[in-house]
Image: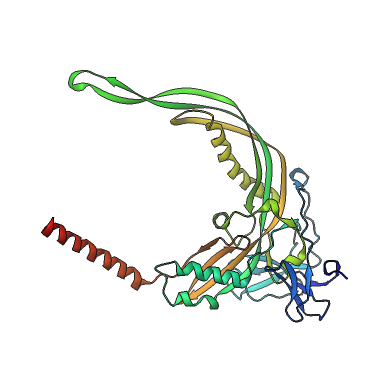
Amino acid sequence: MDHQEEIIEQVDTNTYKCPECGAPMRYDPTTSTLLCDYCNRIINLSKETNDEEEDFFKVGADDLSWQKETQIIKCVNCGSENVVSKKEMSTTCPFCGSKQVVAYDAIAGIKPNRVIPFKLSLEDAKTLYKKTIKKKIFVPNKVKKMYLELVLNGVYIPSWTYDSSTFSTYSGRLGKRYTVVVGSGKNRRTETRIRWYSIRGTKIVDFDDILVNSGKSLSQSDLNSISPYQTNDSLEFEEGYLAGFQAEHYSKDVKTGFNDAKHVMDPRIRSAILSGYHYDVVGSLNIKTHYDKITYKYVLLPVWFGILNYHKKMYRFLINGESGKIKAKYPKSIVKILALIFGIIIGIVLLMYLVSNYG
């Protein structure tokens, strides 16, 4: 039987049972397959893609398809909510490392229809972190040797992506600067003035895959800092990609998320309008926009959450599980900082001495 056609028993949302030996299987980013670490059995996943998106105007009551198998684990410390099997009682939060987590019944809501699988393995993420901190001058030398002791968790972050056609009407006042010479004699001078003119018109702008974070564990700015993600190339959701990882539950529904998408689209519409004029100053610009042909996808994004504990402080870092783009906070060595400052002072004093004696 072809491995891709094999039917494997799903034990829970994050665990699959190996048909050969019965051990849990996990998704392996290096091979993009389900792998059994005990008997090395490999099972291929479908890797199906399509261009279909959901109609925003047909969003109704939440699909309860996950409710039968899942529950929500909530972290008392950071407030994150994760979708896990009803059989699983996770004791550690993947986002902050806290063991203060509680389980409660909750509707798991709309099931994801897209996923970007992890392409970086755990070892890939550790190696990337090691290479990154080696380039940081002020990181203590001891920390540069601690990468193997890092706590890393692979988590799928919930997100909405939106497509929309927009039609805007606008009116406003723009200004161009010009100079004139006024006065005479000693009072003769050049002045800069503004020549104002009115504008009005319409503008059509189409948007594709505006990405909006819908979870609690990351802010939108955090997600932007490790973006982009190739959401147009995302795969049809298959729970096998979650095997061995966790998935955060969305806290922002699809309609609320579109309001955030508008905050991304509106400045771009403004820029598109202004790009058609030559101006130096914007006096006013009133824009009314109609959003049409709105579609969306619910995409799970791969993120490695890392925690480094050093001198009783926790330093969190994020790694894009698709591209490897990293955002991190690092401990800083006071000794190295003081040494640099002292070196700069010595350099300035020496330079002043040379200038005063040989200049």
Can the viewer see residue 93?
A: no
Is residue 133 or residue 244 the one in the foreground? 133
Compared to residue 174, the image places residue 355 above or below, namely below
Can the viewer see residue 123?
A: yes
Left or right placement of residue 94 versus residue 64 in this view? left
Which residue is found at the position 66% from the left and 44% from the top? 208
- The type of colouring in the image is rainbow
Which residue is found at the position 51% from the left and 28% from the top? 277
Compared to residue 258, the image places residue 136 above or below, namely below
The residue positioned farthest toward the top in the image shown: 184
Left or right placement of residue 83 versus residue 200 in this view? right
**Res 58 → quadrant:** top right
Look at the image and tell me in which quarter the C terminus lies.
Answer: bottom left
Which residue is found at the position 83% from the left and 66% from the top? 4
Task: Give the x, y percent position of residue 59.
Answer: 76, 48
Task: Give the x, y percent position of residue 215.
Answer: 64, 59
Task: Give the x, y percent position of residue 300.
Answer: 69, 59
**Res 224 → quadrant:** bottom right
Which residue is found at the position 25% from the left and 24% from the top? 189
The residue positioned farthest toward the right in the image shown: 1
Look at the image and tell me in which quarter the N terminus lies.
Answer: bottom right
**Res 262 → quadrant:** top right
Task: Give the x, y percent position of residue 343.
Answer: 27, 67
